[in-house]
Image (tube, coloured by chain):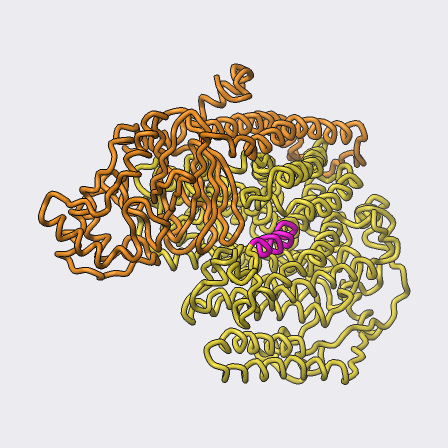
Chain colours: A yellow, B orange
């Protein structure tokens, strides 16, 4: 508890508390609210796209606006919805799963969030200042470098700022998992969600710099007259594609791996069995992460790389199907012989298996380079990646939120409403995207503002749009469920699911310091091990004593705010050099905050033994 | 039975799959109704991959269904604790090795087909046609190398032989996709030339799309490929070489139109053999399947296009209101009588409803 917060009270105090918090549990909530908001924004954009494509030659959206819509839908869903929602789960769960009191760098954790927040807001401000970016989420040059207006500038600055936040968050989780594990929590005893967070963080560390470099080159080309992507001056447009996909392909594994981890934990818990083939699962996760860096050029089969490069990347891509297949079978055999409880979390996880398997199979089909000459940039690809991203990532987020909601908020999301949200979403999802594979092969390219009548594409597109509405209904029911749960559902204890891992050994929501005494881990599924030994909770590995905790700080917010202001300066200094003032003010705020942070010692505070004893008497800190 | 997979196609699964899929889409547009060498080769590869994938999917779903039915918790079993199985080495090996074998089965024809489609061994032989393709916002230009003829929006090729395309773009990235004959290849600005080949089996008018986002009218950058017999193609070359851009039209209105056209439009457009301009070459305009690649070829549409092109193709480079309504009608009369060849008029175009 920061001293500043203690001096104020009421609503403002709460706001101030969240602005300054460095507590991983509160940062998880911030990620959840912001990511959830952007998920809705991206969803509305998706609905507008589907309405436009409801019938041939439709004029619901204008051509330019449509391109802005597809660009922002993709960018928002990937960078501003899926990533933060995943970080919400990681922040809420990983420190608890390894028996830590917080992440390794709580201050950086807050900085990572606020950078993401302001980057996302900056990107979306473009809607109100003359047009959003319109060159697709892939932002290929030279369409992007020559795009009129400031849309693409917003894309560059917004993603650069939020990307820095993501990189910081990734590094933070790497260090946390390496350094902060409780005694006995060896690598091969870590829950799969922690393992996949670890691998994902490593992917972020290596993949995001490629995007950073690409964005800087793009920024210089657009704002400062360089010519990296200008062929007339000796530049090369393909460099952007390589940089983007060297980042972009690992990015899809960054999205899916943590949810593979979540599914593993959920299957195991609701089958009442330990994960089948744990070490194979860990190995497969690492292998997917590794191979994820070897295959970026399969997004570029039609760019003219030649048959040798195309063949190598084709075979490398197919290889990823092997570890993914291992995972699918291990999940099935985790359930085999178990006692399956079909909770809402389990329902989403069970639905994930066929959906993702289809997505994986179309992925292998796409990997066949020669065949990709037909699939590439058609609705087949749109169908494929929505099967993996919705069927994998979105299903995983719903499952993970149902599963960990009681740990985050102390209440179980209403199960009936949860299942009611599932069915329209699930049916709508398959209705929307399955038909798109066929639309693509029948001759419908992606990113088409209109399709013409008389090409046999009318029925398929109508079905797809109807499916999209069902998905929207499912999402709305899920939102209603959140509100309903907040007001109507009773509080639950620390372990509502008969859990197996460490996060279920402490109260829900956990106290500020998580574990009053750091637990001693005696095996895989540590809480389950203790339960099987007839104990109620974890054995502590240390005597009860004062706990050292970090102080909250407004500085991460200020640093990010400075970047936000400087972002506008960079974007508009092309029009008028007086905007450079914004750059100086913004960078001044950021650098000033960094200086303050460097010069002012902040030694944190202690939670005293007496306070802990009081909490334990009230039932906390087991 | 053409294509290298031909001899296996009678196999039950392939046959059934091919039959089901061939019901999808329009002739001369759908990739599932191949009418050329490359598209047939690719469809065979797709069928192999789909067959393997369906095989895997059935197995996964069988286990899945069994597990979900058999191991659901029953009402009174809440206290049962199932055996905590660690894993099974034999099973792990099985579901690692079998997928590897299946993938090898797919990888071999994939690599073969990839090299086959990149083959350029005959490009420099005598009598082999190479067309230089340029993608522009939002139209296509075709220059027939060594033949001193060119066309825009509609590419003429002879059937039964390989025609090579040397492709580039003049502005942003585009991609040339002709699903029923071949796959696609991106066109890049600058010095980089990408090459692919077309080999059409049957005469016909085939629909092509741009498949790389290139601006607001990306979805309207359609083109046609007209495949005609080799004799007819010779005739076409002859006819195109003999186009006289100054030929006097028959009606007065068209004569007026020609004057206006030569004054106001010739700085961008051309008729007859000419290097690529800012706008499309309008040779043989009267026989176009579509105006600007998208509109029905009526006079009304053409007038509307000439006076306000941006309404039909947002963001295109043709200026609006360059001529008044009267002049536009005269120009339309002129363009719609530019009937430079009979070749291709009877080529089937089944994609129309």
Residue B77 in view (yes/no): no
| Closer-to-camera residue (A530/A534) | A530
Residue furthest to the left in view is B252
Judge whether residue A122 is colored magenta.
Answer: no
The number of numbered badges drawn on the structure is 0
Q: Is residue A427 left or right of residue A599?
A: left
| Closer-to-camera residue (A331/B23) | B23
Q: Which secondary structure dominates the residues rendered in magenta?
A: helix
- Note whether A471 is above or below A567 in the view shown: above
Boundaries of the magenta span: A238-251
In x, y percent, where is residue A373? 52, 38
In x, y percent, where is residue B5? 55, 21
In x, y percent, where is residue A486? 56, 61
Judge whether residue A245 is colored magenta.
Answer: yes
Q: Residue at x 62, y 60 (%)?
A: A211
- Note whether B16 is above or below A472 in the view shown: above
């Amino acid at each position: 508890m920061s001293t500043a917060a203690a001096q104020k009270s009421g609503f403002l105090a709460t706001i101030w508390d969240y602005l300054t918090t460095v507590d991983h549990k509160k940062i998880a909530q911030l990620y959840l609210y912001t990511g959830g908001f952007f998920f809705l924004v991206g969803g509305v954009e998706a609905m507008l796209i589907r309405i436009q494509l409801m019938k041939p030659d439709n004029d619901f959206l204008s051509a330019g606006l449509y391109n802005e819509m597809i660009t922002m839908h993709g960018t928002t869903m990937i960078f501003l919805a899926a990533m933060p929602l995943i970080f919400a789960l990681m922040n809420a769960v990983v420190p608890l799963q390894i028996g830590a009191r917080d992440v390794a760098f709580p201050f950086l954790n807050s900085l990572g969030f606020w950078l993401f927040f302001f980057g996302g807001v900056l990107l979306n401000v473009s809607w109100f200042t003359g047009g959003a970016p319109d060159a697709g989420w892939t932002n290929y040059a030279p369409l992007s470098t020559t795009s009129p207006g400031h849309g693409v500038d917003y894309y560059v600055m917004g993603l650069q700022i939020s990307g820095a936040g993501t990189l910081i968050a990734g590094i933070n989780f790497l260090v946390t998992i390496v350094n902060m594990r409780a005694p006995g929590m060896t690598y091969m005893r870590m829950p799969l969600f922690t393992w996949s967070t670890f691998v994902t963080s490593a992917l972020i560390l290596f993949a995001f710099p490629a995007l950073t470099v690409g964005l800087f080159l793009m920024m210089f080309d657009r704002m400062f007259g360089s010519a990296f992507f200008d062929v007339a001056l000796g530049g090369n447009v393909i460099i952007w594609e390589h940089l983007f996909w060297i980042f972009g392909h690992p990015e899809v594994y960054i999205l899916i791996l943590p949810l593979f981890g979540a599914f593993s934990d959920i299957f195991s818990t609701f089958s009442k069995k330990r994960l089948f083939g744990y070490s194979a699962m860990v190995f497969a996760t690492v292998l997917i992460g590794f191979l994820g860096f070897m295959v970026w050029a399969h997004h570029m089969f039609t760019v003219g790389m030649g048959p040798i490069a195309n063949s190598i990347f084709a075979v490398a891509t197919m290889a990823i199907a092997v570890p993914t297949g291992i995972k699918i079978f291990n999940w099935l055999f985790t359930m085999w012989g178990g006692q399956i409880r079909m909770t809402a979390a389990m329902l989403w996880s069970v639905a994930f298996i066929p959906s993702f398997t289809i997505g994986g199979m179309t992925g292998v089909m796409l990997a066949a380079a020669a065949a990709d000459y037909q699939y590439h940039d058609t609705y087949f690809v749109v169908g494929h990646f929505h099967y993996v991203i919705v069927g994998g990532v979105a299903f995983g987020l719903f499952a993970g939120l149902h599963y960990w909601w009681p740990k985050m908020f102390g209440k179980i999301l209403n199960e009936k409403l949860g299942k009611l949200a599932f069915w329209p979403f699930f049916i709508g999802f398959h209705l929307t995207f399955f038909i798109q594979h066929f639309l693509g092969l029948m001759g419908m390219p992606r990113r088409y503002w209109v399709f013409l009548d008389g090409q046999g594409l009318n029925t398929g597109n109508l079905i797809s749009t109807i499916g999209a509405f069902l998905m929207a209904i499912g999402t709305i029911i899920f939102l209603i469920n959140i509100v309903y749960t907040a007001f109507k559902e009773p509080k639950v204890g620390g372990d509502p699911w008969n859990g197996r891992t460490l996060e279920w050994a402490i109260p829900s929501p956990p106290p500020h310091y998580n574990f009053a005494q750091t637990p001693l881990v005696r095996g895989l599924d540590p809480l389950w091990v203790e339960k099987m030994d007839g104990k109620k909770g974890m054995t502590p590995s240390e005597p009860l004593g004062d706990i050292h905790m970090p102080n909250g700080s407004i500085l991460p917010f200020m640093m990010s705010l400075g970047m936000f202001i400087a972002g506008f300066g960079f974007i508009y200094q092309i029009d008028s050099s007086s905007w450079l003032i914004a750059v100086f003010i913004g960078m001044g705020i950021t650098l000033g905050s960094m200086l303050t942070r460097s010069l002012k010692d902040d030694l944190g505070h202690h939670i005293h033994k007496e306070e802990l004893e009081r909490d334990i008497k009230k039932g906390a800190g087991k | 039975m053409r294509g290298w997979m031909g001899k296996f196609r009678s196999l039950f699964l392939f046959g059934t799959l091919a039959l089901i899929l061939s019901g999808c889409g329009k002739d001369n547009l759908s990739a599932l109704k191949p009418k050329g060498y490359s598209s047939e080769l690719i469809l065979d590869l797709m069928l192999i991959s789909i067959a393997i994938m369906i095989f895997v999917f059935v197995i996964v779903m069988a286990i899945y269904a069994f597990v979900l039915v058999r191991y659901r918790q029953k009402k009174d079993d809440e206290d049962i604790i199932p055996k905590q199985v660690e894993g099974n080495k034999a099973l792990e090996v099985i579901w690692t090795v079998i997928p590897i074998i299946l993938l090898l089965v797919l990888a071999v024809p994939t690599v073969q087909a990839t090299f086959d489609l990149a083959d350029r061994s005959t490009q420099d032989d005598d009598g082999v046609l190479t067309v230089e393709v340029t993608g522009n916002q939002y139209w296509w230009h075709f220059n027939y190398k060594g033949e001193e003829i060119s066309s825009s929006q509609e590419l003429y090729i002879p059937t039964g032989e390989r025609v090579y395309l040397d492709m580039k773009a003049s502005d942003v990235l585009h991609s040339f996709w002709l699903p029923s004959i071949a796959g696609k290849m991106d066109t890049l600005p600058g010095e980089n030339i990408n090459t692919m080949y077309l080999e059409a089996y049957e005469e016909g008018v085939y629909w092509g799309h741009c498949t790389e986002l290139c601006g607001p009218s990306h979805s309207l950058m359609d083109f046609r490929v007209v495949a005609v017999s080799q004799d007819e193609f010779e005739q076409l070359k002859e006819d195109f070489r003999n186009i006289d851009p100054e030929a006097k039209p028959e009606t007065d209105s068209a004569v007026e139109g020609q004057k206006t056209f030569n004054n106001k439009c010739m700085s961008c457009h051309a008729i007859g053999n000419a290097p690529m301009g800012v706008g499309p070459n309008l040779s043989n305009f009267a026989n176009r399947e579509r105006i600007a690649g998208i509109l029905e070829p009526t006079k009304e549409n053409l007038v509307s296009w000439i006076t306000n092109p941006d309404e039909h193709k947002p963001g295109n480079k043709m200026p609006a209101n360059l001529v008044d309504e009267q002049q536009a009608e005269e120009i339309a009369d002129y363009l719609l009588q530019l009937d430079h060849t009979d070749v291709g008029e009877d080529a089937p175009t089944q994609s129309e409803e």
